[in-house]
Amino acid sequence: MPALAVFTATAATGTMRPTIATAVAIVLAATSGIAVLWSTRVGAGVGPDRAALGVLAVACAMGAVASGVQAARIHTLAAHPLTELTGGRTGVQLLVTGFDRPIRSGGVMVPVRVEVTGSGTSARAAQLDVVLLARDGWRGLPPGTRVETSVAVLEPRSAGDPPALRALTAPRVTGLPGWTGRAPAAVRERLRQVSGRALKGEAVGLLPSFVLGDEGRIASETREEFRAAGLSHLAAVSGANTTYVVGAVLLAAAAVRVGRRGRIVVAGLALAGFVAVVGPEPAVLRAAGTGAIGLAALGAHRTGRPLAALAAVVLLIALLDPTTATGAGFVLSVSATAALVLVARPVAQRIRRPWMPGPVADALAVCIVAHVATLPVLVASGLGSGPWALPANIAVAPAVPLVTVLGTSAAALGPVWESGAVVLAAACSPALWWLDTVAGVVAGLPGSPAVTPG
C-alpha cells in the first residue's frame, strides 16, 4: 500500500505546478494526521476499523512525501537555466551518463548530465539529466566523458519533463572517463569484434544488441521489423536478462552440488559481474534489481517476500528519481516482475503436460504472463504493437535465454580470451537466425504496424 500510494502521488503530481503539488502534499499530510487522531479515539467495535485508519494514515503520509518530492523537483526544473533558454541556443558543459543509441531519424540519442550552462561570465552551474540528440562525432563516447558543445534547447515532450538538447557542434572532450566507463566500453568493442568473427549477416549486430543494448550495428529495417513484431524490448537490457544469467549460474551451481549459501554467493557475484559487463547505467541497475526479484519469485514457494521487495524498489525509485518511476520503461519492468511474482508459477503448472519438460513450461509461462501484464502499459504509452506480438514472443521464448546466457558469457570472456568468446558467440547463431526470421515474418503479417525504416 505505501508503494502504491507513493507511485500514485508521484504520477498524479508530475505535471502540476510546484504550488499545487505542495498543496496536495499538505492536504495529504493533514489527512494522515486526522486519521491518526481518529484512530486513537476509536474504541473496540465502535466506528471505523482502527487498522483501516492506520493504513489510510500511512498511505496519505507516504503520498504527502512523494508529492513534496515532486514539488521540489518541478521547482528545481523550472529554475534551471536550460528551462529559461527553451527555443534558444547556448553553450554547455556535459557529462555523458550512458551509451548512445540510434534513432529513427538518423544520428544518436545520448543520455547526458548538464553541469554548466552558458559560457564566460554568463556560465551558470546547475545539474540536470537530459537527452542529447546528435550526429557526427558523438558515437561511442563512454559514460563518464566530459565534453563541451553548443546546443539548441528543445521543448520538453510533456509538462514536467526537462527540455531535450540538439547538438550543433561536435563534442570537445575536456575530461576522460574513469574505469567504470572505460571497462564497459572496452567490453562492447570487443564483443563487436567477436560478433564480426563468429557471425554473419544481421546476427553480427543482433548479438551485441540483445546482450548489451548496443544497437549501433543493426540495420534500420531490421530494427523496424522487431518493433513491428512486438520484439523491440529484446534490444533493451531488462530484468529478464539478469534472471536468465543468474538463473543459469544457479543451475550450474546446483548441478555441481554447491550448498544453498554457496549458490546465493555465486548468484550475487554473477549479478555484480553482469552489471560490470553491461555497464552501471541507471537502466542496468534497475534491471538488476527487478531481475533479482523475479529470480527470487521463481525459486520461492511464497510470493510475499519477492512482492515486498518489489514494492520497496518501487518506493525507493519513486522517491529518489520520480521521472524514472513514472517512465514507461520502469512501469513495464515493474508490471512484468509483479506478474512473474504472482501468477507465473500457477500458469506454468496449468500449462504443463506430460510431454512438456518443466523448463519449457516455465519459459512459456514467463513469456505469456509478462506480455499480458505489460500490454496495457504498452497501449497506454503508445508503444503497443500489432496483434501478432504475443505469438511472436512465444515463438522466440526458447531462443532468448540461450542468446542472453551465451552472449553475456562471450562478452565477459572476450577481453581475456577472444577465441573462446568467438566459440560462444558462434553457438548463438541458430537462435539469432530464429529471432530475425520470426521478426521478419511477423512484421509482414496483416495487421502488423508498417515497417518504415529511416
Image (cartoon, rainbow, N blue to C red):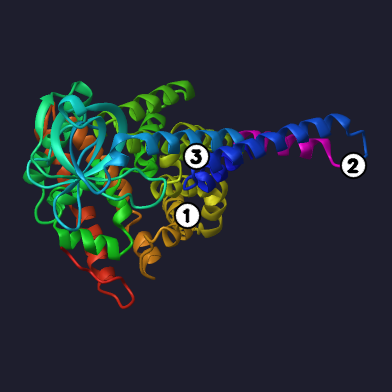
- Decide: few, some or many residues near mark 3? Use Cα within 10 Å; few <14, some 14-19, many ≥20: many
**Residue 37 position in % (x across, y down):** 80, 30
Looking at the picture, how far across and down is residue 320, in whole percent?
45, 31
Q: Amino acid at mark 1?
A: Ala
Residue toward you, 233 or 412: 233
Position of the C terminus, as image quadrant, is: bottom left
Question: Of callouts 3 and 2, which one flags the residue occurring earlier in the amino acid sequence?
Answer: 3
- Amino acid on which disc 3 is placed: Pro
Q: Amino acid at mark 2?
A: Gly
| Position in image of residue 382 (x %, y %) | 38, 61
- The residue positioned 21% from the left and 28% from the top of the image is 122
Question: As rendered, which of 331 and 25 lies closer to the eye?
Answer: 25
The residue singled out by tag 2 in the image is 47
The reply to whether residue 439 is in sight is yes
Q: Which of pointers 1 and 3 lies earlier in the amino acid sequence?
A: 3
Q: Left of 32 or right of it: where is 106?
A: left
**Residue range of the region highlighted in magenta in the rendering:** 47-62
Picture quadrant where residue 114 is located: top left
Residue occupied by mark 1: 365
- Residue position for label 3: 18
User: Which quadrant of the figure has residue 137?
Assistant: top left
Q: Which quadrant: the N terminus?
A: top right
Judge whether residue 304 is colored magenta. no
